[in-house]
Amino acid sequence: MYEPPDEQAAGQHYLVCGNEDCEKNGEFYCNACHRPMCEDCQDEHLKQTNTKKHQVVLYRQRRRQLPEEKCKLHPRRNLDILCKECNIPVCSKCCTTQEHQGHSYDDLEEIYSERFASMFACCQNKISEIQESYLPKSHQLRRNITVDATEIKNTMENIRTDMESEAKSLKLLVDAVTSENMEQTRTVENELLRRLELQEITCDEYIIYLENLVEKMQKSMATTSFNIISLSRYEELEIRNLPKITKPNLPIFTAGKCRKEDVVNILGKLSEQFQAKELVKRKNKPTASLSTNVKPMESHEEEERGRSVVKQRLSLSSSVTKIREYSVPGVDSVYHVSVDKLGRLWVSDSGRNLVQIDLEGILLQRMKTSGRDEGYHTVTQDRDIAIVHTERDEKVIKMLGIDKTTTEFIKTGDWTPLSVHSSRINGDLLVGMIKDGEAKITRFTMAGKQTQRIQWNSKGQALYTSPHYIAENINGDICTSDYFKEAVVVVNELGQYRFSYKGQGSRFRSWGICTNVLGHILVCDGISATVHLLDQDGQFLSKILTQKHELEHLRSVFVDAEHNLCVGQHGSNTITVFNYLQ
């Protein structure tokens, strides 16, 4: 506990009595005389007539002496009285003036002593708290920082060592593959040259045959002998056909399509986790209340810049809370929802109705389409809406611009398009199609050029049966809800099969599908009226919405700009919004 200098001195030695010629320990204190005293002098002091009424206390309980301060009106007097009415210190002569006539007064020294004692006790408590709690914890934090710095250096050095080891391993593999390829080229080259050498020998033999034949005939032409048989022999002679010489089929080198991302996946990458553990307990800051409006979506660039921050900030909540629900005019069900960058919704039902509503739920556009219970519309990065049309032998994707003009974008030929999804990564269109019992997903650029077809796995087996809904995950995976296959089928951005999800034992009928900023996959099960939550690798995490949330015939699911979960149902034009992240 903190003590002032004179208290420290009293604790270390002792205070000398304030009376002359007395050097005993001054353990008492006269508040009137403001003088320390020993026990004997205290007894004598209280026996004297003029001092017997003085207040003598233990030294530690003494009243603080009022600091001297001269009165500005009466410079020869000290300020030692407090005028209660004016609440100002005054001297004894001020009390006799007209200004303070009839006022009541307090002893300024007593008030000063009380307030000083209160301040002294408060400071003692604060100093004690600092010395006993804050300083030790601060020093511990400082030591923790030093330990953390050492740990960072050791960890990063180990990571660098592992990176170098992985790089060396990859280099060895590259060298081995390159060596094998080089050896193969030499083997192929030798074999081709051997075949050419054999053909060369055949040609040489044929040339010799021809030269010998010419030589014989020339000799016969120059002969003078008369031999009818030898002359008629050349008339029947047939020259052998030219030898069959084939041009070798030269091999073709197919260069590997190795991108930087592929090398990163092989070598590994450093995951940046800058969200440090909280070392000091802090009071929880008040959080802003959740908005009940669907806010405009961020631009793609802002979304990409903020994605890592959002991922660090958000996590799955232990409970799911219903925020609100709102009705969509012009439809009788909510089978599929597309959200544009301004937060406006395009909503379709199974009766070929497609409507657009604003943030207030006001109907902006309404149209009839050929689509029914599929994800047949999507909003592009240019805020156009791509719509599947299959009426009257039409098999096209049409674009409805923000100026409400419709243009034909892609013809799908013999294939019937079912679903469409606009990539948030590069703006490509992913189109699910069927034909004669086959199904595929085709990627188109915004210029209408086909760049990818996803139809079979590495064993030649069909991936899809009926790709009703398509979503794209943050890692580029293409997630498809296949209605008749009763499964979620996921391939990577190269179209290579990753995994399928078919529910948790009981029958599973997948409907609407979406992904969130954490890379989770959310899919509606139309049979159990639940929403299943999967991680990025297809592992089942939980059922976010269950029958206790009183939802029936779930069909559509999407995530709004605030990362809330929004669902739609068959037989109801209501969209229900839930908070499931924290």
Image (tube, rainbow, N blue to C red):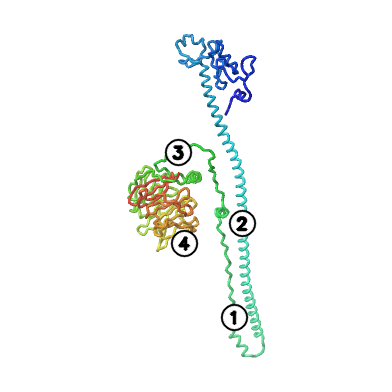
Q: Which mark is residue 456?
A: 4
State if disc 1 and disc 2 touch (CB < 8 Å): no
Q: Which residue is mark 1?
A: 240
Q: Earlier in the sequence, mark 4 or mark 1?
A: 1
Q: Tell me the amino acid under the disc marked 3.
A: Thr
Q: Tell me the amino acid under the disc marked 1.
A: Arg
Q: Position of residue 255 (x, y in %)?
A: 57, 60
Q: Tell me the amino acid under the disc marked 2.
A: Ser
**Tag 3's secondary structure?**
loop
| Up-down relation of residue 393 to residue 385 (above or below) | below
Circle 2 or circle 1, nearest the eye = 2
Q: Earlier in the sequence, mark 2 or mark 1?
A: 2
Q: Which residue is mark 3?
A: 287
Q: Earlier in the sequence, mark 3 or mark 2?
A: 2
| Up-down relation of residue 15 to residue 358 (above or below) | above
Q: Earlier in the sequence, mark 4 or mark 2?
A: 2
